[in-house]
Amino acid sequence: MIRFKLLVLIFVSFLFGRGLLAQDNKDTLSFSLEEAMSYASKHAYQKINSEYDIKSARKEIWETIASGLPQIDFSAQYNHSIDVPVSLLPAEIIPEDMRPPGVGPGDKVPVSFSTAYDGNYSFSATQMIFNGSYFVGLEATQVFLDLTRHQDEKTEIEIRDAVAKAYFLVLSARENHAAFQENFEINRATLNETEAMYENGFRESLDVSQIRLMVREAEKQIVEVKRNEEVALAVLRFSMGLDEDQPLVLTDKLEALSDRFHPDNMDDSWSPREHIDYKIANTNSESQRLQLKNIRAQYLPKVNAFYTYQKTGFGDEWNIFNEEWYKSQFVGISVSMPVFSSGMRHAQAQRQKLSWQKSLNERQLTLRSIKTESLTTLTEYYSAIDQLDIAKESLELAEDIYEKTRVKFSNGIAGSFELTQQQGQYVQAQINYVNAILRVLNSRIDYLRAIGKL
């Protein structure tokens, strides 16, 4: 019986453990660089807001279309005249037998033509027949939708840019962390060796203190780089639209990305007119042109057809709904047209024309800026590649010098001060190498964004 209970307990524990493991695997997300950017393109906060803007722009199109379709309104009113309005009539138009006592020719007789209660309700329908601004508005809403879509595309590019650079920061921090951890282990082993040699009289206390200082400095570097990694992870989670405590696994490696971003893998075929900034500038120019067209359309007449059905009831008692109600109907066409505005509309048209011409100039400026930025970022990218080659060679040299100095120190040929100098040089070379890789990756992202291919 005891054995059976034990087996049941082991089985339940096994299932519970598998459940926890499955939960952990479910909670932990793994992303390559491209997967992280793709995820952020759908879930980032800025992307969600941008999609709301597109939906709003679509609703605005229908709002504009609906304004030119039939409009039907209903209205109703019920009135109680506490003091019934009175009018004064000449006594001459009232028969003598109906005049109040003492009223003669030349006098005024107070007469009421309304009842204490009245009400009415009506249905009215209007249909636009012609309005120049309406047709311009239909064009403008479509242009506005295009502009919103372009802004959405630009937002996505900015999100991918932010995610990539945050991803690189996390990888560089982890690369430094691994190097500093290895350096710490070497320093600690060197300290143990130096302390043993000191106890046997082969080293001075100064050497022990110097190596112990190196160990403390290595610990400090590990703490700092760990904090940098946490900050970079927080930025990455925010850029991707993840929860702030979401566990992440980054599957790409820093040097592998650097190799993937080699100049041999670059595609230089691109068109500045396909760049998102140029599309936005071009759409803005079209918007300014339509605004000018709309001002000019104000000179045209506006024609509307209308129909109204109305019923009115009267009574001296509050319940006028038992009384007879009288109906009336109206149908017609209304025309309105501006005649003279003292030059105001002409000035508006001229001012808008200048705005349109300015937008054309800004479009050309944007085109030139795109070409200039692409050249600048490409130059920066090639410069970063050259600096990386130098940093890599410097790291190899610094590592070789440090290892030889460490061997010399172990054999009592070199002093602790010299070892400290060479280690500091090696650590700085490691930092420079990681920063050089980071510069290559960031400059490549900048170039891809500059040519509109991020």
Image (cartoon, rainbow, N blue to C red):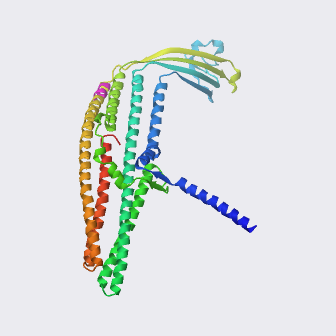
Locate residue 342, reporting x and y percent: 30, 24
Name the residue: 46% across, 55% down: 249
Q: Position of residue 201 (x, y in %)?
A: 31, 87
Residue that sits furthest to the right in the current view: 1
Image vertical order of residue 413 relative to residue 376, above or below: below
Please tell me in which quadrant of the rendered image residue 276 appears.
Answer: top left
Please identify the quarter of the rendering in which residue 214 is found: bottom left
Tell me which corner region of the image, top left, top right, bottom left or bottom right, holds residue 310: top right
- Range of magenta residues: 345-350
Which one is in front, 238 or 179? 179
In front of the other: 334 or 226: 226
Residue 349 highlighted magenta (yes or no): yes
Residue 80 in sight: no
**Looking at the image, residue 109 lies above or below residue 201:** above
Q: Is residue 394 magenta?
A: no
Work out whether residue 109 or residue 204 is closer to the camera in this orientation and state it.
204
On screen, residue 400 versus residue 38, left or right, reads left
Residue at (50, 22) in percent of width and height? 69
Q: Nearer the viewer, residue 234 or 404?
A: 404
411 horizontally vs 333: left or right: left
Number of numbered discs overlaid on the protein picture = 0
Classify 41 as above or below 429: above
Assign the magenta stretch its main secondary structure. helix
Residue 302: percent from left, percent from top: 42, 19
135 on left or right of 446 = right
User: In the picture shown, does residue 84 fall above or below 247?
Assistant: above
The N terminus appears in which quarter of the rendering?
bottom right
Q: Is residue 320 visible?
A: yes
Give the residue drawn at x 29%, y 35%: 271
